[in-house]
Amino acid sequence: MPQKSLFKDCSWGYQIYPMIHWSFKVLLFASILGLLVIYGFDSWDSSRFHNDFVAIKLNNAHQYLTHTHQNIDQFTASSQSRLSFQENFTQPREDVEVGLEPMPVTNSGSEEPLSLEWISAEVEGNFTSNLLSAWVGSGVEPCSDSQTVEIMIPELDGHDYIELSTGKIHEFVFQAVDEVGKPHCLGGDYFETDVSGELWKSRPPIKDLGNGTYTFSLQVHPDFSGDYNVTIILLFRHFQGLKNSPERFAFDKVLRSIPIKFIKSSAQLSAIRQCVKSDFTRDIWSGRWTRHAKNDSCTISNDGRYRCQEPDFPCQQPWCDGSLGLLESNGWTYSTHCSFKLFSGEEAWNCLNNRWIFFWGDSNHCDTIRNILKFILNLDYKDVPRHFDMKITNPDNPRQTVRITSIFNGNSNVGGNYQGLSSLYNVTYRELLKSYFSQEIVPDTVIMNSGLHDGVFWPTLRRFTKGAEDAAAFWADVIDGVRQKGLVLPEIIFRSTIATAGYARRMAFNPSKMEAFNGILLDKLRQSVLVSKVIDDFDLTYPWHFDNRCSDGVHYGRAPAKLQWRDGQIGHQYFVDLMLCHVLLNALCQQ
């Protein structure tokens, strides 16, 4: 008997209803096609599909924001980086070269403004060991026989006019180029960066990727839109600034001076609040100087001072709090991840009353102490010696006193120089320091730094690292002695060493070396659990370090005088160190 077909019982459906069968095939084909299309979008990852939709929706609301470079590897790092990538991704193909041609920036009144974060710099983990590894390996890698002489910035080069939006962080990549125009494959070059406008000065953070490529980031607050100039200087090549006698290796060439217009956008940066105690735990700062007044007719007085605004001229919130006129800066003030209170004499005395502040570092401390006494506490001190210990009384209120001690660390001999941390190897000098912490009353606060003298003394990075370890061990022993006596432990504030200025940028205490030494000493003090707070004076001074208008090269706080200054002009600007004085008071007084 013939075998029965398995489909015999249902064959009637095809014979009676051919249209049903045809419709079914169409439906099946459409369903499969739909699955294939959906599968192509993130392999059915519904959450990512939703995120793409949100990003594109935001992009439509701000489609005219100027493009910025974003690293695709950071695509999922934050909602802000995701938005920036979507802005680039959704543009027509001819606009792939982002950031080159200006585009109009419009603010939509019907949309809420974007909420953005401030630029911030972070210390990489294992700072000292990573720096030592890179420094020790220099000279043995591929392409070590060539040096950087130029750079290429694909997104900015070749364009006479560039617009960027305010608020956003604009990141750019550039490539180091050698003598024959080929990409250089090693890192370690020290570039100085600056973004300046009439009312703004800051250091764009730069990151060395270790392979001849670098990134830098630009950001300007919406309140300061306008014309800017971005400058990139190659100061030293491949760790040469860390050498014992680096001046002969200085390259010191301006590689780019780029005019950029920052257009006001609807983006809003997170609000800057006044600094509190916890704000001083950050190891490195990314601040900016902003200007809120300008008196073009202001001239130097016979005592060398610039009183361009009245002493009670007010700060503008949120950039500072108090009387901006006290800085004698013709409107400039400094802020970072928080803003600073500018103290009146009465407020400063109320804070410092019955306290003992101990300074240990280079002679810049002497200038700062004198400026606190003269400009803030209203005392007539013309000079503070390298070794200074005095109980000071408020002339307007004799019941208020403060003890200030300063011990110079540039040399174990008070009249010497260029020993730095190695002064601690002198037994007599060590005992002098210990004597201030061996009684029943000890300093409330220790403010310390490494100092410029270390830049001259230590022949290699490795030797300085050993000196920093020994210095941290010494201070750990001092503090342990206080602990064993059952006394309240002093608070230790690390004040980073300045960025040397003008001619001094090329010398043994150049910014490249001092920035490295700052990081190493802080690293060692952190390992010994000594530091309570950090004041980044390197960042505070950096925007003014390109010439000698605010510094003689190695000091920012020299006393005002109507005399010829190093740059040939009569008088000099001293407000940078006055700002440091107020920053110190914030660290000492704010809760």
Image: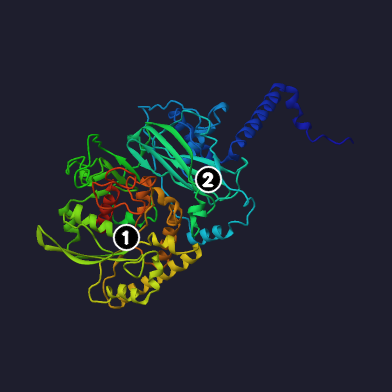
Kindly identify the amino acid type of the residue bearing the numbered disc 2: Tyr
User: Tag 2, which secondary structure?
Assistant: strand
Kindly identify the amino acid type of the residue bearing the numbered disc 1: Ser
Q: Quadrant of residue 182?
A: top right
Q: CA distance from mark 2 to mark 1?
A: 35 Å
The mark lying in front, picked from 2 and 1, is 1
Q: Is residue 95 visible?
A: yes
Q: Is residue 523 visible?
A: no
**Residue closest to the eye, 337 or 129:** 129
**Residue closest to the eye, 209 or 373:** 373
**Residue closest to the eye, 424 or 413:** 413
How far across and down, in percent of the image, does residue 142 sit? 64, 52
Q: Which residue is mark 2?
A: 214
Q: In which quadrant is the N terminus drawn?
A: top right
Q: Do the numbered discs 2 and 1 sit on residues whose CB atoms are within 8 Å? A: no
Please, is residue 135 above or below residue 82 in the view?
Answer: below
User: Tag 1, which secondary structure?
Assistant: loop
- Left/right placement of residue 438 relative to residue 458 reads left
How far across and down, in percent of the image, does residue 536 sit? 36, 54
Q: In which quadrant is the C terminus drawn?
A: bottom left
- Left/right placement of residue 524 relative to residue 8 reads left
Please, is residue 285 above or below residue 166 in the view?
Answer: below
Q: Quadrant of residue 94?
A: top right
Disc nearer the start of the sequence (2/1): 2
Q: Which mark is residue 363?
A: 1
Query: Label 2: how many residues lie within 10 Å, few (<14), some (14-19) or many (20+)?
Result: many
**Residue closest to the eye, 573 or 228:** 573
| Residue at horizontal 40 percent and vertical 66 percent from the top | 419
Q: Quadrant of residue 228?
A: top left
How far across and down, in percent of the image, does residue 364 sit? 31, 57
